[in-house]
Amino acid sequence: MNALPEICSCSALRQAARHLTRLYDEVLAPVGLGLNQYSILAKLDRNGELPIQDLASLLVMDRSTLGHLVRPLEQRGLVTIRVSKKDGRKRVVALTPEGNVLLASARPLWKTAEDRFRTRFGHDEAATLRAVMRQVTAIELRSTTNPASEASGQAHR
């Protein structure tokens, strides 16, 4: 199938992300994790326990989506969610010993997916892609102007 190149940057990015996510999900399936859940466990391992809002920010994800992903991890005993001792309004997520064990068994699987992608896409290209994606997630794209005015080149007053 010869599809025309995507002209919408967001659509092209989402299509590529779904394509790549399938690889990681398939490789991580034997340990019962998808890429999103693996990413949550890995972030908690690297950063320690985190308030839900901070974890969502690190994952560039909204809190409600994160909540839907974290609950099954909590039910499996891989993470705990508790009220923050510093601020009773915040909830904190932490990796459990069981989560650490599962993450350790998932890492080689994740590396298999990562190596497969880098080999097929190219090691330098993969590094460049990660750098570009860091740039994309670092820029502020939300506007305080009216989108219709912005499209016509006039700021909302």
Image (spheres, grey):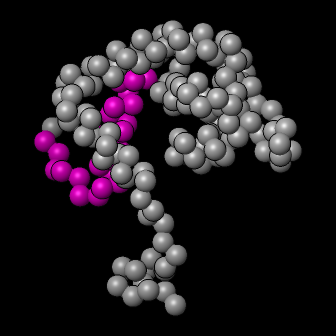
Q: Position of residue 90 (x, y in %)?
A: 78, 45
Query: Residue 103 versus residue 22: which sits nearer the camera?
Result: 103
Q: Quadrant of residue 84?
A: top right
Q: Position of residue 91 (x, y in %)?
A: 77, 40
Q: Is 59 drawn above or below residue 74 in the view shown?
A: below
Can I make out residue 37 in this image? no
Image quadrant for the N terminus?
top left
- Dominant secondary structure of the magenta stretch? helix
Q: Quadrant of residue 48?
A: top right
Residue drawn at x 68%, y 36% is 50
Residue range highlighted in magenta: 2-25
Residue 7 is covered by the magenta coloring: yes
Q: Quadrant of residue 96?
A: top right
In the picture provided, is 107 more to the left or to the right than 101? left
Q: Position of residue 145 (x, y in %)?
A: 49, 79
Q: Is 16 drawn above or below residue 24 in the view shown?
A: below
Residue 123 is covered by the magenta coloring: no
Residue drawn at x 33%, y 22% is 114
In the picture provided, is 118 more to the left or to the right than 54? left
In the picture provided, is 17 more to the left or to the right than 28? left
Q: Position of residue 148 (x, y in %)?
A: 43, 81
Residue drawn at x 37%, y 36% is 18
